[in-house]
Amino acid sequence: MLQANDQSLEAAAYGALGIAHRLIGQYDKALGYHTQELNLRQELNDLRGECKAHGNLGNVHVSLGNYIQGYKVTLSIHPHICIERSEIVGTASHSVRNCSNTLRQADPIKSLIPSLKY
């Protein structure tokens, strides 16, 4: 059985692999790695890491052109992180803002996105 520190390193490795695969256009693999990253972060109760994993998953969806899904994945972490760990609010808000800015630039769905204030 892995120790918590080992699992944290494993999650970081999945995150790095996911980012690398997204950058070379292997989006299915990137989604798989980031999902594994998220699962480990949740097991570890690592809210900061969970926030990053959700942001990474959102970035992959945006890269695929799935803007609404990217927005939903990124936004899904924001409420509970704000409540439980106020120091992470900035990180979560940054991810949501990046995703919403991308959405606003996509003409077909621009009107679907409300004005966000994060």
Image (tube, helix red, strand yellow):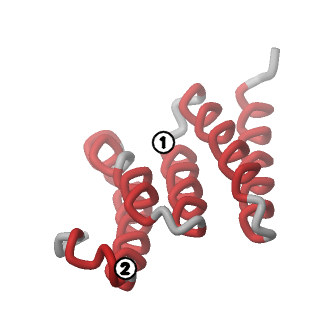
Most extreme residue toward the front is 108
Q: Nearer the viewer, residue 32 or 77?
A: 32
Residue 17 falls in which quadrant of the image? bottom right
Q: Is residue 22 above or below residue 39?
A: below
Please give the residue where the numbered disc 1 appears in the rendered image: 47
**Residue type indicated by callout 2:** Asn
Q: Which mark is residue 69?
A: none
Q: Quadrant of the N terminus?
A: top right
Q: Nearer the viewer, residue 54 or 22?
A: 22
Please give the residue where the numbered disc 2 appears in the rendered image: 101
Secondary structure, mark 2, is: helix
Image point (79%, 38%), residue name: 10
Image point (80%, 69%), residue name: 24
Image point (76%, 46%), residue name: 14
Image marks 2 and 1: residues in contact by CB distance under 8 Å: no
Secondary structure, mark 1, is: helix
The location of residue 48, given as percent across then percent down, is: 51, 49
Q: Quadrant of the C terminus?
A: bottom left
Binning the other alpha carbons within 10 Å of mark 2 as few (below 14), some (14 to 19) or many (20 upward) gives some
Residue 116 falls in which quadrant of the image? bottom left
The location of residue 113, given as percent across then percent down, is: 23, 70
The span from disc 2 to disc 1 (Cα, nearest Å) is: 24 Å
Q: Give the total of numbered labels.
A: 2
Left or right side of 11 for 59: left
